[in-house]
Image: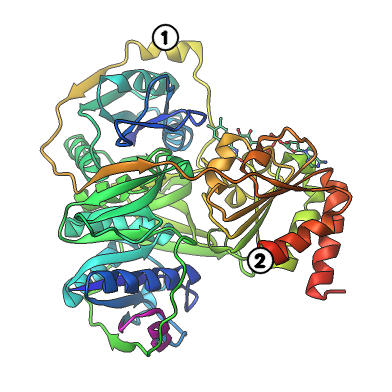
Amino acid sequence: MKILVCISKTPDTTAKIAFADNNTKFASDGVQWIINPYDEWYALVRAIELKEADPSTVLHLVNVGAADSDPIIRKALALGGDEAIRVNTENADSFYIASQIAAIAKEGSYDLVFTGKETIDYNGSSIGGMVAELLDLPYISHAVKFTVEGGNAVVVREIEGGEETDKAAFPLVVSCQKGMAEQRIPNMKGIMGARTKPLRVVEPAAADSLTSIASFELPPAKAGVKLVSAETPEELVRLLHEEAKAF
Amino acid sequence: MSVLVFLDQADGHIKKSSFEAASYAAKVAELTGTTAEAIVLGIVNDDLATLGNYGIKTVHTVAEAALNNMDAQVFTNILSQAVENTSADVIVFSNNTTAKAIAPRLSVKLKAGLVSGAVALPDTSNGFTVKKTVFSGKAFAHIAVSTAKKIIALNPNSYTIVPASGSAAIAPFAATIGTAKVEVVSVNKVTGEVPLSEADIVVSGGRGLKGPENWGLVTELADLLGAATACSRPVADIHWRPHHEHVGQTGLAIAPNLYIAIGISGAIQHLAGVNRSKVIVVINKDPEAPFFKAADYGIVGDAFEVMPKIIDAVKKLKGVA
Ligand SMILES: Cc1cc2nc3c(=O)[nH]c(=O)nc-3n(C[C@H](O)[C@H](O)[C@H](O)COP(=O)(O)OP(=O)(O)OC[C@H]3O[C@@H](n4cnc5c(N)ncnc54)[C@H](O)[C@@H]3O)c2cc1C
């Protein structure tokens, strides 16, 4: 089996969110970059587990980004995977990114494409579905469990208010979330090995963008907390009922 | 021209968040000088004519039992036929797991720019831009959509329904359904619980509650308020509570009217998923807990002493013995 895992670079979860150039750009000065947690903890680790269970599995990683993505790609390779492909372009919108990934997935004839359920910066939840549509493949989103049974993919996915178990033939696209796997820490052997794994840089395919970011905005600051004494919790209930009209 | 809203259903009933999306679609139609229509797939038991009360003129139905479970490819194909049939140029979804499976596919199929996680009406004063959440609720972006057709996936609880009056026409739609490539083996729904993403009130517990045996403090209050329950990430990680209750940057992002956090420190990753709640209440014994900075109301105190009193006061208010 050939697996392609999509890896996105996002600001660390504690990064200060601020904007520059008249609120048109994310202020990235001093920001630590990480692999998007959904891509790393769930998609990548589950793919590594599949390779561990069947060593004939070929596992490739793909990132759409500029050279400043290389550190997070190396970190992903330190966790596992045979090689990485970076499509050398500044990120545009999700349709453009999905078009790049679809081109790579098609060229490499992968049986399985894994993405995270969303990125923690743009929260689009759209790359997986777009890649699947571009390739005319089934797409199972919000997967919490993935196994291969009798040559088919068996996937448990989250639906509104519960879970659904699905079965589909390969090839397919799956977006991954919590439950798929447990977070791993790269070990020394992995880190050393990652340095010599191939990182292929390819030029982007021609594709459009359908949307663009006009500007950013920060939410208004809170007015400040109104504290109620621990001696009179019923006063909190009264305030929520009468003042905030919350119930 | 029209605005077409996708009504998501479960077990024969339209989901609450879809009514919000319908009302939003009606407003978009008004802003762009056209009419709002809706489409619903599968067997629905609700009286669809009442969609008129949300400003919808026509509800297109494909009442096939095969569509009771969502298949992203099949649904995308039917929706693209409906878009053509209604000449829709704006397509609206409520941004739930169903929409996240279909809207991106439809975006590709129609070459329609997609804004997922929208929180406001489009601004049409200079092109077409839609405000959406980014950085997991820590900021907003205004997204300009440059394509002729546009898709908006509206976050639940971010648009206030504008009541309208009227009765929607019901129009059965003869769509080519096609066969699903994904087989649904089984569906396992948690019934009787308020779905977290749609809840008006959420009561949430953190590691400060010490263990799953103390969760009665959370669930009792939630039951009294008709609220959904949530938890912080470590609480789900150590299996005190199920994973689907985990809110925050790497869990579910929610925006209820009222979020009550008990024994949760308010780490930045937790706040990211809940800071769009209208009213935030924090109960924590540590006056320095960062959550107080993001809260509207709070009590500095021991949850084990404070919560029973709060529960009693709510019982009194609700007239429950
Ligand atoms: C990449 C990344 C992603 C993350 N994503 C998320 C996420 O999505 N969601 C999330 O929640 N976390 C997330 N975290 C974890 C986050 O950083 C915090 O560790 C976590 O939110 C803390 O959970 P907590 O508040 O329940 O526990 P703690 O931090 O242990 O806080 C417990 C709180 O309870 C209070 N307390 C103790 N006893 C009592 C009592 N008797 N009465 C009242 N109060 C009491 C304490 O004062 C304390 O404030 C993430 C972390 C990372 C690194």
Image spot of residue B214 (x, y percent)? 81, 49
Quarter of image, res B79: bottom left
Q: What stretch is highlighted in magenta?
A: B49-58
Image spot of residue B87 (x, y percent)? 17, 73
Closer to the camera: disc 2 or disc 1? Answer: 2
Q: Is residue B58 visible?
A: yes
Sort mark 1 into few (<14), some (14-19) or many (20+) by Cα contacts within 10 Å: few
> Can you tell which mark lies on residue A192?
1
Q: Assign a secondary structure to mark 2.
A: loop
The answer to whether residue A190 is above or below residue A6 is: above
Sort mark 2 into few (<14), some (14-19) or many (20+) by Cα contacts within 10 Å: few
Quadrant hosting ligand 1: top right
B162 and B181: which is toward the camera: B162
Residue at the far left: name it.
Answer: A206
- Rounded to the nearest angstrom, the CA distance separating label 2 from label 1 is 59 Å
Quarter of image, res B42: bottom left
A117 and A26: which is toward the camera: A26
The answer to whether residue B238 is above or below residue B147 is: above
The answer to whether residue B183 is above or below residue A26 is: below
Q: Assign a secondary structure to mark 1.
A: helix
Q: Mark 2 points at which residue?
A: A245
The answer to whether residue B151 is above or below residue B40 is: above
